[in-house]
Image (cartoon, helix red, strand yellow):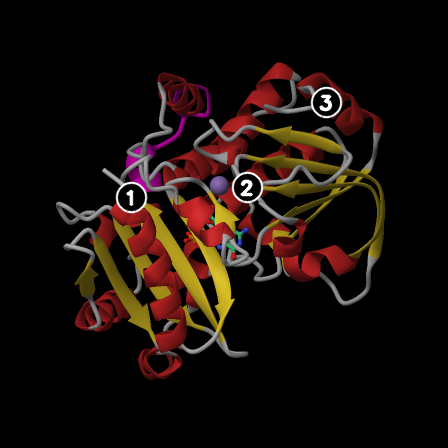
Amino acid sequence: MSNTTFEQIGQVLREHQHFAILSHVRPDGDALGSQLALALSLEQLGKQVRVWNEDGMLEKYSFLPHADLLTKPPATAEDFDVAIALDTAIQNRLGTTVAAVRSAKIWINIDHHLSNPGYGDLVILDPSAPATGEIIFDLIKSQGLPLNHDIAENLYAAISTDTGSFQYPKTSGRTFEIAAELVRDGDLDVGKISQQLYENYPRRRLELLRELLRTMRFTAGDRVATFSLSLKTAAKLGVLPEDNEGLIDHLRAVRGVIVAVFFEELTEGKVRVSMRSKDEAVDVCAICQKFGGGGHSLAAGARIRGSLAEVEEKVLEEIREVVKRGP
Ligand code: 5GP
Ligand code: MN
């Protein structure tokens, strides 16, 4: 799956001093946890590490060990030996972090997105991995890099969130083995981490869900379920972009639904589309790629120009075509 070995990456990590670790805009637990884990491991080796994301650390992940290491990129660019993109399907999704890297001798790309074209000098791409955190774990273990409690907790959070708490189809025996090793060797408190991840939402997230359910629609013989969020409603509720992560699962969880879609109106006349499939025969990554997006076969997204109504119509038409051909 990858054209670079862990040994090559390990050698580059050992031989250099200044690192930038970056991930995608609108980050999730896998992006942030993987970044922090790798950064902490490199710091243990005495390396200088910057950890940047366009959106900075999200409030809901600020419990992660050493969350304060992760910041928005600075206005003044810096020079690096190595820049590492984690969990980022296309370079463009690194957002403003790229401009803060004035130079890097080597670009490393470590990811698990099917749609990743393999940008960068050294590339580890494993679409079979359910989380980038799993690849970082393998890198750390295979190269004998430092792994302590804080690193383990970040990796556990990355893997737990990107597998939907060890539920999604790419969750394998290996995933459980890795989790077991992290819990045992890192002496992790699973109950406490899970509570921080899944039982610590602000009340406005539920208020948002209530509004989204008001817009819920079922089409294509109830096999496609959608809801949408307008800028007006988002402003009325005072929600943050991070509040809607995971709400689409309520649509996917309905019996008979194959495709779930969430439409979120953005500023600049665009709509963020988030798509989930419950059936390998319906590849939502392929659908999103038609609109310039990407992701995984069962979870993908795109940002599409147009009004909410226009984008909804265009996207639903495309989905209906695929679902019609489907099972
Ligand atoms: P989500 O729906 O949770 O935002 O994203 C689902 C998956 O699709 C994630 O793995 C994410 O990286 C990917 N994805 C979401 N939006 C985009 C996009 O605009 N472009 C690309 N290439 N991938 C996206
Ligand atoms: Mn991921």
Question: Residue 191: within the magenta?
Answer: yes
Left or right position of 162 against 217: right
- Give the residues drawn in magenta, as a range: 183-196
Q: Secondary structure at mark 3?
A: helix
Q: Disc 1 or 3, which lies upstream in sequence?
A: 3
- Amino acid tagged 1: Arg
Distance from the alpha carbon under mark 1 to that under mark 3: 46 Å
**Which residue is the site of mark 2?**
115
- Does any portion of residue 246 appear in the rendered image? no
Compared to residue 311, the image places residue 269 above or below, namely below
Badges 1 and 3: C-beta atoms under 8 Å apart?
no
- Where residue 40 sits in the image (x, y, percent)? 63, 36
Residue 115 horizontal/vertical position (percent): 55, 41
Whether ligand 1 has any atom under 8 Å from the Cβ at mark 2 is answered as: yes
Give the side of residue 54 with respect to residue 284, left or right: right
| Main secondary structure type of the part rendered in magenta | helix
The residue that label 1 is drawn on is 325
Residue occupied by mark 3:
10
Residue at 36% x, 22% y: name it.
172
Say above or below: 221 vs 306: above
Q: Residue 89 lies in magenta, yes or no?
A: no
Residue type, label 2: Ser
Determine whether, in the image, residue 183 is placed left or right of residue 154: left
